[in-house]
Image: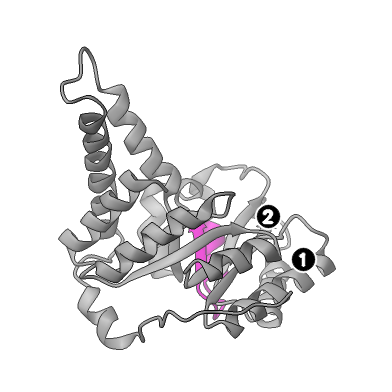
């Protein structure tokens, strides 16, 4: 996420009266982006969550919480099962102690013909053992049938009581609303917004009047349009007041984390 993304997404949320989640990828130099996201959230007329994605170390979780995120996605799914469970449980506990929600990443069999029942049972146990607020599902390899096949898997995982999270690129466009109805509460669309920004740059031909400012504005507009389309299509538009009336506001406090 950069400033063009921040402005474009916030503008889309406010124009459509939708709650929105600003996702910042865990990386070096994350502090300025989180500071900008927190400032935008504080000044927005709609509910805005500030979420740190791809957290895989305790240090990154600590830094994200210190710099203002109110949610994070933990990802230690590449570790052996026992180590993954221990790391995810510790991350969720750390976040909870600071009033921050945390989800965890879970790999699932990419082949739907695999032992799905056992995998779903294991997923439910993993969510319960870690105390995760949501499960981010990631195929364990390439889906044989491509993005369209993930909708079949999601229908089976919808039986879990924990909310689900997916990457938009992993789900066929025609199945996204079905996924939302089936229990997917978080859709990560960073790649698609980036593609929208890139397409705006590719459409620029010849001399550019206004220099970089004009290019930046076109990028913002592309991100705004892509974000607004998704907020409308996925059912978020018009629900800002509902969220404001039913969810408690995040309280910013100074955290002292010893590790």
Q: Give the number of the mark in front: 1 or 2.
A: 1
Residue at the (70%, 66%) spot, across then down: 58
Q: In this view, does 83 lie above or below 250?
A: above
Asked whether 62 or 167 is in front, the reply is 62
* Badge 1 vs badge 2, beta-carbon distance below 8 Å: no
At label 2, counting other C-alpha atoms closer than 10 Å, the crowd grade (few under 14, some 14-19, many 20 or more) is few
Relative height, residue 197 to residue 8 (above, below) = above
Q: Residues within 10 Å of mark 1 (few under 14, many from 20)?
A: many
Report which residue position mark 1 lands on: 84
Residue drawn 39% across the image and 46% down it:
2
Taking the image as drawn, is residue 140 in sight?
yes
Residue found 22% across the figure and 65% down from its top: 237
The x, y position of residue 1, in whole percent, is: 42, 48
Dot 1 or dot 2: first in sequence order is 1
Q: What residue do we see at 48% from left, 47% from top? A: 148
> Is residue 20 visible in the rendered structure shown here?
no
Q: Is residue 91 magenta?
A: no
Say whether residue 205 is left or right of residue 66.
left
Where residue 40 sits, quadrant-wise, is bottom left
Relative to 7, 157 lies left or right: right
Residue denoted by label 2: 113
In which image quadrant can residue 181 be found?
A: bottom left
Q: Where is residue 92 in the image (x, y as percent from the top left)?
A: 64, 76
Gap in angstroms between the C-alphas marked 1 and 2: 25 Å
- SS type, badge 2: loop
Question: On screen, 68 above or below 244?
Answer: above
Q: Which mark is residue 242?
A: none
Callout 1 secondary element: helix
Judge by depth and name the residue closer to the eye, 70 or 116.
Answer: 70
**Residue 25 x/y as whole percent:** 52, 53
Q: In which quarter of the image is the C terminus?
A: bottom right
Q: What stretch is highlighted in magenta?
A: 151-166
């Amino acid at each position: 996420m950069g400033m063009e993304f921040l402005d474009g997404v916030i503008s889309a949320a406010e124009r459509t009266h939708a709650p929105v989640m600003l996702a910042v990828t865990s990386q070096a130099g994350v502090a300025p982006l989180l500071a900008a996201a927190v400032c935008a959230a504080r000044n927005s007329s709609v509910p805005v969550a500030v979420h740190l994605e791809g957290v895989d170390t305790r240090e990154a979780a600590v830094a994200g919480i210190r710099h203002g995120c109110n949610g994070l996605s933990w990802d230690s799914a590449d570790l052996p099962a026992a180590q993954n469970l221990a790391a995810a449980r510790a991350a969720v506990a750390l976040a909870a102690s600071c009033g921050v929600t945390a989800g965890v990443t879970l790999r699932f069999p990419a082949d739907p013909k695999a032992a799905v029942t056992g995998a779903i049972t294991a997923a439910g146990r993993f969510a319960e053992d870690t105390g995760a607020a949501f499960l981010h599902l990631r195929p364990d390899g390439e889906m044989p049938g491509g993005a369209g096949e993930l909708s079949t898997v999601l229908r089976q995982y919808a039986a879990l009581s924990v909310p689900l999270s997916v990457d938009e690129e992993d789900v066929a466009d025609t199945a996204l609303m079905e996924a939302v109805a089936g229990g997917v509460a978080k859709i990560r669309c960073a790649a698609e917004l980036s593609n929208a920004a890139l397409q705006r740059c590719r459409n620029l031909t010849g001399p550019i009047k206004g220099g970089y400012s004009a290019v930046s504005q076109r990028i913002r507009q592309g991100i705004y349009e892509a974000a607004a389309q998704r907020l409308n299509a996925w059912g978020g538009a018009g629900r800002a007041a509902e969220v404001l009336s039913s969810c408690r506001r995040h309280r910013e406090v100074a955290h002292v984390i010893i590790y």
